[in-house]
């Protein structure tokens, strides 16, 4: 589905003209949210980042394709793996001073900031394996091209409607019936028919597995 088709179906579901001018931004939010929930292999990227002299961190927003916040591997210039700690607190527990000089031994990601220790006395190049954000359509003819077409309706029509209904029903004291219904169709992990569940199933089916065989004569 292209953006116009998605927007038209959302308008038919919501039937609230006060949201018409903001639906494109909500569609984009929905696409980015989907990419944050599921690791899409097509969004994997490899790029390098330079350490900063006398500084224990570097920002990753300049990475190729944009940085989604998902970091999977860090390698030094020799190709050796660098330990990734779950957070800065754990990195500081291991390296309390955070001021020692030397080759980078470990890193921790906080948002888009990569903290590292030790601090190289000369610039060190780190190679990163990460996920970028999915592309969002910039025109009405554009599509959410990083996702399978057969799931566009369940993910992006019902997902965008969920975002909008959540605002419409926010000021009511009654249960958010429409919000819950649209969430159930789009991002409810407990619903085996939801868009996000079907996306995970599709990824599992299309994932390549290493198969080795040998022939003996």
Image: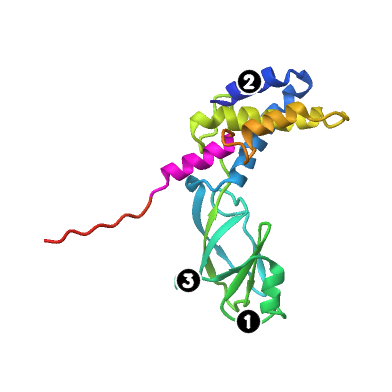
Which range is magenta?
A: 195-208
x, y (%) of residue 190?
Answer: 63, 40
- Residue 31 highlighted magenta (yes or no): no
Magenta: main secondary structure: helix
Q: Quadrant of residue 98?
A: bottom right
Q: Which residue is drawn at the image coordinates 62% and 77% (left, top)?
A: 118
x, y (%) of residue 198?
Answer: 53, 37
The answer to whether residue 198 is visible is: yes
Residue to which mark 1 is pinned: 101
User: Upstream in the sequence, badge 2 or badge 3?
Assistant: 2
174 versus 109 height, above or below: above
Disc sitting over residue 9 in the figure: 2
Badge 3 element? loop
Task: Find out whether the residues at labels 1 and 2 contact each other: C-beta distance under 8 Å.
Answer: no
x, y (%) of residue 1?
Answer: 53, 25
183 versus 57 height, above or below: above
Residue to which mark 3 is pinned: 77
Q: Which residue is drawn at the image coordinates 80% and 27% (left, top)?
A: 168
């Amino acid at each position: 589905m292209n953006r116009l088709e998605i927007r038209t179906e959302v308008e038919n579901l919501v039937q609230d003209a006060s949201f018409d001018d903001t639906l494109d931004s909500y569609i984009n939010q929905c696409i980015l949210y989907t990419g944050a929930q599921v690791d899409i292999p097509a969004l994997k990227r490899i790029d390098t980042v330079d350490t900063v002299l006398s500084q224990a961190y570097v920002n990753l927003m300049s990475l190729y394709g944009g940085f989604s916040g998902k970091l999977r591997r860090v390698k030094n210039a020799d190709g050796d793996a660098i330990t990734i700690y779950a957070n800065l607190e754990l990195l500081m527990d291991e390296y309390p001073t955070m001021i020692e000089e030397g080759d980078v031994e470990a890193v921790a990601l906080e948002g888009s900031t990569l903290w590292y220790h030790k601090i190289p006395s000369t610039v060190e190049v780190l190679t990163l394996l990460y996920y970028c954000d999915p592309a969002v359509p910039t025109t009405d003819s554009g599509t959410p091209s990083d996702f399978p077409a057969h799931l566009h309706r369940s993910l992006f029509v019902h997902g965008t409607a969920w975002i909008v209904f959540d605002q419409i029903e926010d000021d009511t004291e009654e249960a958010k019936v429409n919000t819950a219904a649209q969430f159930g169709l789009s991002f409810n992990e407990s619903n085996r028919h939801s868009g996000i569940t079907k996306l995970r199933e599709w990824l599992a089916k299309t994932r390549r597995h290493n198969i080795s065989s040998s022939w003996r004569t």
